[in-house]
Image: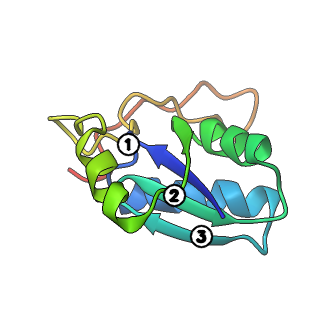
Amino acid sequence: MITFQVNDMTCGHCASAITRAIAGIDDKARLDIRIQEKLVRVSSTASTAELAQAIQEAGYTPREIQQAPAASASTSASTSAPAPKSGCGCGCATRKAAPVDAGQPPAPARGSCCG
């Protein structure tokens, strides 16, 4: 199982986007997503690099972390980067929607999916 710290994953929308991204490269992958801990654990036949790239292409910043014993895991969680202080943090307000047709202009960015 490969574990990623994804500090910019802050809500269910973020988790869904990451789940779809992983399914796009391995539809049989098993995921354990922990939003509060900002952890994504993946059991897959895809390589770590492929998984990380899929998460990045979904708009998030994965960082592979090594599995630690349960006692050490709580220590490492306390040293992770703090969550963003405003909005849901999923970045949907800053992303530009892709046009449905190449001839259409991009849709204007809207507010956060969570607010």
- Residue 90 is tagged as 1
Q: x, y percentage for residue 75?
A: 27, 50
Q: Amino acid at mark 2?
A: Val
The quadrant in which residue 1 appears is: bottom right
Q: Earlier in the sequence, mark 1 or mark 2?
A: 2
Q: x, y percentage for residue 81?
A: 29, 34
Q: Nearer the viewer, mark 1 or mark 3?
A: 3
Q: Earlier in the sequence, mark 2 or mark 3?
A: 3
Q: Residues within 10 Å of mark 1 (few under 14, many from 20)?
A: many
Q: Which residue shows up at 21% across the image and 40% down it?
A: 87
Which of the pair 35/41 is nearer the observer? 41
At mark 3, the secondary structure is strand
Q: Tell me how far mark 1 sits from mark 2, CA to CA.
A: 15 Å
At mark 1, the secondary structure is loop
Q: Is residue 50 above or below residue 20?
A: above
Q: Which residue shows up at 35% across the image and 37% down it?
A: 110
Q: Is residue 7 above or below residue 4?
A: above
Q: Tell me how far mark 1 sits from mark 3, CA to CA.
A: 19 Å
70 lies left or right of 56: left
Q: Which residue is mark 2?
A: 40
Residues at discs 1 and 2 in contact (Cβ within 8 Å): no
Q: Residues within 10 Å of mark 3 (few under 14, many from 20)?
A: some
Q: Nearer the viewer, mark 1 or mark 2?
A: 2
Q: Amino acid at mark 1?
A: Cys
Q: x, y percentage for residue 23?
A: 72, 64
Q: Amino acid at mark 3?
A: Leu
Residues at discs 2 and 3 in contact (Cβ within 8 Å): yes
86 lies left or right of 9: left
Q: x, y percentage for residue 111?
A: 28, 39
- Residue 31 is tagged as 3
